[in-house]
Amino acid sequence: MQDGALTRVEVINALREKGPTLAARGVIPFWGVGSDDDASALFDEADRNGDRVLTFEEFAALVDRRFGW
């Protein structure tokens, strides 16, 4: 969308397309290469305000909670 937020579909597609390469390089943890259902569940967990888009802050907070980055 290029509006600074990610939709569920954008997150699923990005993790499907780029997840394996990024995980192999150590850029993201291997949770990023799960199934579409895993990516969707990750999206739901990160969408703290329930507005069906992820801001950078929501995504960063999830990564910090799960992985201490």
Image (cartoon, rainbow, N blue to C red):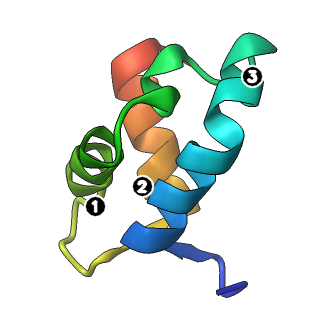
Q: Which residue is mark 2?
A: 58
Location of mark 1 (residue): 47
Q: Position of residue 33 (x, y in %)?
A: 50, 29
Residue at (81% x, 14% y) in the render: 25
Mark 2 → mark 3, Cα distance in angstroms: 18 Å
Percent x, y of residue 48: 23, 59
Residue indicated by mark 3:
27
Of callouts 2 and 3, which one flags the residue occurring earlier in the amino acid sequence? 3
Q: Residue at x 66, y 48 (%)?
A: 17
Side of 40 relative to 24 (left or right): left
Instruction: Find numbered disc 2 in the image and state the secondary structure of the residue it sits on.
Output: helix
Residue type beneath disc 1: Asp
Q: Is residue 35 above or below residue 4?
A: above
| Residue type indicated by callout 3 | Val
Q: Is residue 45 above or below residue 30?
A: below
The answer to which of marks 1 and 3 sits earlier in the sequence is 3
Q: Residue at x 21, y 46 (%)?
A: 41
Label 3, residues with CA under 10 Å away: few <14, some 14-19, many ≥20: few
Q: Position of residue 2 (x, y in %)?
A: 72, 84
Query: Is label 2 or label 3 in front?
Result: 3
Secondary element type, mark 3: loop
Image quarter in which the C terminus is found: top right
